[in-house]
Image (tube, helix red, strand yellow):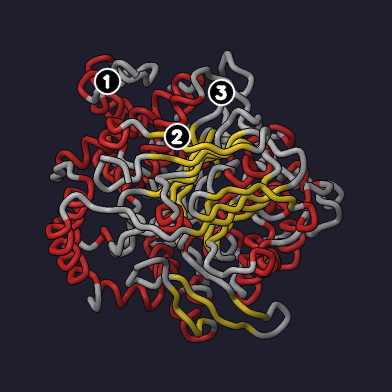
């Protein structure tokens, strides 16, 4: 470990073009100011892509796996790894740079991030492009790049098993792409342990562009802490705040699926391509139904008491082993959003999407858009290669998923995302092409939820429901994603004090609530600087017309629709409070100086 407490002080960089690897020292001030995870990944991306307009699929674009200072230590619910890169799917309305796009970061749980830290690193950076499909093996300080051509086209479930057999040691923790990533679908994902994913923003596409099928990591060390006695005391407080509590038990009971029925009842769910906020058959695909009819096992990420992941078995036409789900996002985007209430059919769609290595959210959004365009007569069955893509059709949904992953026929168009699809179809379809900056919206509808609308348009990676509904939440979540802690347990107020104590004890840098949020503000502003440099302006912080024109017709929020003037006023106030120019959204010099970003 380096002289910086809580860190190894180095990252491992692998250049697939040269076949060489090296360790790179992290500047101590970057660890102090950007912490790890999302923050450190953003600083590394900023430093490495000094000029705007770099093609996200070029060898120059780094693909980074960055855990946080909590990762690899027995801190509850702190397994997270941020995958940071430049997005292959977003684009500004106007830019001087052909390949302008946003930063993207995708946060996954599991065991990969802790294993990176066990191997002696605070992150992995992959650059270049292998001549043939390859995989990387990291065993502490030993690094090898090996031929993966025999695995070409293999789906992720089968590959997960075959790869561990190839490695001959189940202690390795692995990440990999499926056929969608190999085929460079812009919203393809990176999969870990078959059911966990870095899904949003196309990191799997970037991995595929490097001819990289998989990475395996195994380590035998552990990071240290600055104050061991203080760490142990804070750890006990954190455990008491979560272990065995009613809060933890509720997550173990249903995970995020508990929100499928609740959000539908509240009128904030994505239904029929965001046309409605309430799904009248939500109870058939919600947490109660899944617990009763499907799930047989709860499983957890590294050191997590919540165990929100589920697995089970279904029967009938779409029956088989369920490796994960429904979760809220997957259950809504492939269920309510497509008007599918057949639980086994829904779970088959979820399984196939992960197996092919696609982002669940974008895939469900794209198919919902095509269903609506088909319903309105803008496209026909010939356009859809004969698929009768009606609302609620499981078979049609499964057929479209296969075509998208293979870029086969209509799938080649659908793989481009709803922004490009709507430009191709025309006929006013842009009104219901549900995206921001090219990234499709997630499963939270917004006609009756204006704060969530703010989250979608101001998030750094395009439409993001996790970024935060206001400035304080955005700063806090940027920082949470930098520590390695999952934000689900942080909904428990009793965890806040021990979490700050843990971070202080590990890093030796004192954090109270104000310091924590200030660090998050610095990270969020650096992301904004990256996007601004690429050409993103206020005009890109734009919602589809649907949310201002199509009021809900059923449910608790019946009649709800966003007011365009009030929304623009809210945006102006947001920029002003951020210290950004309300006309251009450029961060102001006073704000940058306050955050220590003026020299950046």
Query: Looking at the picture, how far across and down is residue 365, in whole percent?
Result: 59, 50
Q: Is residue 545 visible?
A: no
Nearer mark to the viewer, of 2 and 1 = 2
Determine the residue positioned at 46% across, 58% down: 219
Quadrant in the rendering for residue 63: top right
Up/down of 149 relative to 90, above or below: below
- Could you say whether the residue bearing mark 3 is in a helix, strand or loop? loop
Up/down of 208 relative to 234, above or below: above
Residue beneath label 3, please? 93
Question: What is the CA distance from the residue labelled 2 to the residue labelled 3?
Answer: 37 Å
* Tags 2 and 3 touching, CB below 8 Å: no
Query: Looking at the picture, how far across and down is residue 108, in whole percent?
Result: 47, 55
As rendered, which of 425 and 237 lies closer to the eye?
237
Question: What is the CA distance from the residue labelled 2 to the residue labelled 1?
Answer: 27 Å
**How many numbered marks are there?**
3
Q: Is residue 229 left or right of residue 294?
A: left
Query: Looking at the picture, how far across and down is residue 285, in whole percent?
Result: 52, 73
Determine the residue positioned at 61% across, 31% down: 56
Up/down of 196 relative to 423, above or below: below
Residue beneath label 1, please? 592
């Amino acid at each position: 470990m380096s002289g910086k407490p809580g860190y190894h002080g180095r990252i491992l960089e692998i250049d697939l073009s040269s076949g060489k690897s090296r360790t790179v020292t992290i500047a101590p001030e970057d660890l102090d100011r950007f912490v790890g995870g999302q923050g450190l990944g953003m600083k590394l991306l900023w430093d490495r892509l000094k000029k705007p307009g770099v093609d996200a699929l070029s060898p120059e674009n780094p693909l980074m796996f960055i855990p946080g200072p909590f990762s690899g230590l027995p801190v509850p619910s702190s397994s997270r790894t941020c995958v940071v890169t430049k997005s292959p799917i977003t684009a500004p309305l106007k830019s001087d740079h052909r390949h302008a796009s946003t930063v993207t970061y995708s946060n996954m749980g599991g065991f990969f991030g802790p294993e990176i830290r066990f191997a002696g690193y605070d992150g992995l950076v992959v650059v270049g492009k292998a001549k043939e499909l390859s995989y990387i093996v990291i065993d502490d300080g030993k690094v090898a790049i090996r031929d993966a051509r025999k695995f070409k086209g293999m789906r992720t479930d089968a590959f997960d098993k075959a790869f561990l057999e190839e490695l001959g040691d189940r202690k390795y923790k692995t990440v990999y792409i499926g056929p969608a990533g190999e085929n460079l679908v812009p919203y393809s994902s990176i999969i870990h342990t078959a059911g966990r994913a870095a899904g949003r923003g196309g990191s799997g596409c970037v991995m595929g562009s490097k001819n990289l099928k998989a990475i395996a990591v195994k380590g035998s060390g552990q990071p240290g802490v600055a104050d061991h006695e203080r760490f142990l005391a804070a750890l006990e407080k954190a455990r008491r705040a979560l272990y065995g509590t009613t809060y933890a038990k509720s997550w173990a009971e249903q995970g995020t699926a508990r929100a499928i029925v609740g959000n539908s009842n509240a009128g904030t769910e994505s239904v029929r391509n965001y046309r409605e906020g309430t799904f009248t058959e939500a109870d058939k695909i919600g947490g109660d139904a899944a617990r009763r009819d499907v799930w047989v096992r709860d499983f957890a990420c590294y050191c997590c008491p919540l165990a929100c992941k589920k697995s089970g078995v279904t029967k009938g036409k779409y029956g088989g082993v369920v490796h994960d789900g429904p979760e809220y996002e997957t259950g809504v985007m492939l269920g309510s959003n497509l008007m599918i209430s057949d639980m086994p059919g829904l779970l088959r769609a979820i399984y196939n999407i992960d197996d092919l290595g696609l982002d669940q959210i974008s895939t469900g959004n794209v198919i919902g858009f095509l269903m609506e365009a088909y319903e309105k007569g803008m496209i026909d069955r010939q356009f859809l290669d004969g698929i009768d893509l009606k609302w609620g059709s499981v078979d049609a949904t499964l057929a479209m998923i296969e075509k998208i992953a293979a870029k086969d026929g209509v799938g080649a168009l659908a793989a481009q995302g709803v922004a490009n699809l709507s430009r191709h179809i025309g006929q006013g379809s842009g009104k219901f092409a549900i995206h921001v900056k090219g990234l499709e919206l997630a499963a939270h509808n917004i006609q009756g939820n204006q704060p969530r609308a703010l989250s979608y348009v101001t998030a750094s990676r395009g439409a993001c429901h996790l970024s935060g509904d206001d400035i304080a939440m955005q700063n806090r979540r940027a920082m949470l994603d930098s520590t390695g802690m999952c934000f689900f347990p942080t909904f428990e107020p009793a965890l806040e004090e021990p979490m700050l104590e843990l971070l202080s004890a590990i890093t030796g840098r004192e954090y109270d609530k104000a310091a924590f949020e200030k660090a998050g503000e610095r990270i969020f502003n650096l992301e904004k600087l990256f996007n601004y440099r690429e050409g993103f302006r206020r005009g890109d912080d734009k919602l589809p017309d649907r949310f201002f024109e199509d009021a809900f017709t059923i449910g608790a929020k019946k009649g709800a629709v966003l007011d365009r003037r009030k929304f623009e006023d809210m945006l102006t106030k947001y920029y002003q409070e951020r210290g950004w120019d309300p006309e251009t959204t450029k961060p102001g010099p006073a704000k940058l100086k306050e955050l220590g970003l003026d020299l950046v």
